[in-house]
Image (spheres, grey):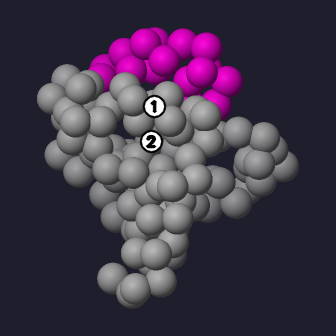
Amino acid sequence: MPMDAIANARRLRQSQTMAEKALWKLVRNRRLGGFRFLRQVPIDRYFADFVCEAGRLIIELDGAVHEGREDYDERRTEALELFGYLVVRFPNDRVLADPGGVGDDILAVLRSDRV
């Protein structure tokens, strides 16, 4: 992994949004069903917000910056799925208003028998 990717990932982890902080509090240290999550993981030319390698799952949080960028987000999701991940998106406001419900939804995906 190029050094700039590592530096960018570190910078992104240090400048989290409120929603990212809330979700990280929920999933860090295997708190969510014993699954291990990482933050701001470089995959190809993108940085995935949260990654669970064991579940081949990427969680993306979408805030105001994503408005009007639906085509870009769709292409990004397709690219990440080519690496064998399922990408699940949650709006920032839902994570902030209902972190427990978001956690339940993530666990349901991780425990499902998806192909």
Q: Crowding near pointer 1: few (<14 within 10 Å), some, many (20+)?
A: many
Name the residue nearer the viewer: 68 or 4.
Answer: 4
Question: Could one spot residue 19 in this view of the protein?
Answer: yes
Q: Earlier in the sequence, mark 2 or mark 1?
A: 1
Does the stretch in magenta take in 58? Answer: no
Write the start and end of the magenta stretch as one range.
88-109
> Where, by quadrant of the figure, is residue 2 drawn?
bottom left
Position of residue 53 measured from the top left corner of the image (x, y, whole percent): 23, 51
User: Which residue is painted at 22% across and 36% down in the image?
Assistant: 29
User: Which residue is painted at 52% across and 44% down in the image?
Assistant: 60
Left or right of 1 on screen, residue 18:
right
| Label placed on residue 23 | 1
Question: Could one spot residue 82 in this view of the protein?
Answer: no
Task: Calculate the distance from the C-alpha at mark 2 to the C-alpha at mark 1.
Answer: 10 Å
Viewport quadrant of the N terminus: bottom left
Viewport quadrant of the C terminus: top left
Give the foreground label among 2 and 1.
Answer: 1
Position of residue 77 measured from the top left corner of the image (x, y, whole percent): 53, 55
Position of residue 59 measured from the top left corner of the image (x, y, whole percent): 44, 41
User: Which residue is painted at 26% across and 25% down in the image?
Assistant: 32
Residue pointed to by mark 2:
59
When the figure is inspected, residue 95 is found, relative to residue 18, above or below; the finding is above
Kindly identify the amino acid type of the residue bearing the numbered disc 1.
Leu
Name the residue nearer the viewer: 79 or 26.
Answer: 26
User: Which residue is painted at 39% across and 29% down in the image?
Assistant: 25
Identify the main secondary structure in magenta.
Answer: helix
Name the residue nearer the viewer: 25 or 72.
Answer: 25
Asked whether the beta carbons under mark 2 and mark 1 sit within 8 Å of each other, the answer is yes
